[in-house]
Image: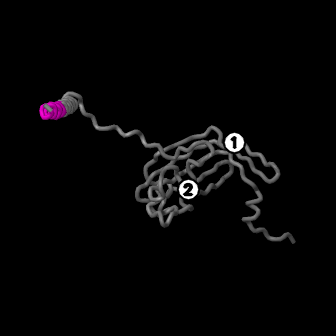
Amino acid sequence: MDVFKNLVFKSTKRFLSLIGLVIGCLTLIVVVNVLPLRPAQAAPASVGVAPASQNAFEFIGRVDQNDLDFSGVGYLTYIRDLSNAQIYSNPLNPSEDTARFTYVATATLTSRAILTDVFVIDSQGLITFYFTQTPPNRDFANAASFASGTPIATASSARAKSTSLTRSCRHSSRRSPAP
């Protein structure tokens, strides 16, 4: 009698396993043949977006003023979620010549206030960011060299504010002593 129970139990267990395998195979066949397969759509990549109080990006640049007009060029030195190898073609030599992300900006002065040692400047303008996989040699004296590559973002401002301390300018400039 024990032999009979053992055979029934083993046979039932094998039978249920076989049924499970058949159901799994049928499900796979239905999914593959009936449902249309589409390539997975990757979510759009989002870089350079940071929570409040954290930098999304950092840059080095130069701004020149001619009367009421400003022109600026530079390159991005940090972009949140990107490594230095993605930002520079040679991450061991980060510079304007190896930067893959650059910008060119123009603006017009709309107002200026001088508060003791602080300049507060309002302007309206446009900034364009560029991406270049293989950066060319660039020169801050040649603004056009920063406009190479593919434009990847453009922003305009109805009003941009800049604040500058004159003390830092005094320390960096040399003046002749008064006679």
Structural distance between the alpha carbons of marks 1 and 2: 23 Å
Report the amino acid beneath label 1.
Thr
| Displayed quadrant of residue 33 | top left
Mark 1 lies on residue: 110
> Residue 62 location, x and y as percent?
61, 57
Residue drawn at x 46%, y 47% as measured from the top left: 151
- The segment highlighted magenta reads 2-15
Secondary structure, mark 2, is strand
Residue drawn at x 16%, y 31% as measured from the top left: 5
Q: Is residue 78 left or right of residue 149?
A: right
> Are dots 1 and 2 in contact, CB under 8 Å?
no
Report the amino acid beneath label 2.
Gly
Mark 2 lies on residue: 74
> Which residue is situated farthest in the front direction here?
1
> Residue 39 location, x and y as percent?
28, 37
Asked whether 87 falls inside the magenta stretch, the response is: no
172 lies above or below 37: below
Looking at marks 1 and 2 on the same chain, the residue that comes earlier in the sequence is marked by: 2
> Residue 94 location, x and y as percent?
51, 63
